[in-house]
Amino acid sequence: MLKVREVILKLLHSSHQHMNADEIYLFVKQQVPTAALGTVYRNLNQLADSGQIRRVKRIAGADSYEGNVLPHDHLVC
C-alpha cells in the first residue's frame, strides 16, 4: 500500500500545476482510500518545511503547493 507522503510527492513532482490541500487530498484519497485530510495537511507541512515541495502563500484563499523547488517567480495579478 502506498504511503500518503509518497503519493503527494509523486503527484506534485509530475504535475506542472499549483494545487491546494483539498485538491491534493482528493487525488490521495483515490490512491489511499483510508487517508484522512489531516494526514494530507501534516504531510504537506512536513514536505514543505523540509524543502521537498514548495508552499505558495496566497493573499486570498488557500495556500497551494508545487513540486518545483527551483527558484522561480509567481505572478500575482
Image (cartoon, rainbow, N blue to C red):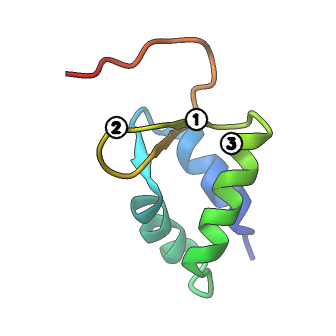
Q: Residues within 10 Å of mark 1 (few under 14, many from 20)?
A: many
**Mark 1 or mark 3, which is nearer to you?**
3
Position above or below: 51 against 77: below
Q: Quadrant of residue 26?
A: bottom left
Q: How crowded is mark 2: few (under 14 residues within 10 Å), some or many (20 or more)?
A: few
Q: What element carries label 3?
A: helix
The Cα–Cα distance between marks 1 and 3, rounded to whole angstroms, is 10 Å
Residue under label 3, please give it: 48
- Relative horizontal placement of residue 14, taking residue 69 as reference (left or right): left
Task: Tell me which numbered mark, 1 or 3, is placed earlier along the sequence.
Answer: 3
Position above or below: 65 against 43: above
Position above or below: 33 against 55: below
The Cα–Cα distance between marks 3 and 2, rounded to whole angstroms, is 18 Å
Residue under label 2, please give it: 59
Q: What element carries label 2?
A: loop
Residue under label 1, please give it: 67
Q: Residue at x 74, y 33 (%)?
A: 51
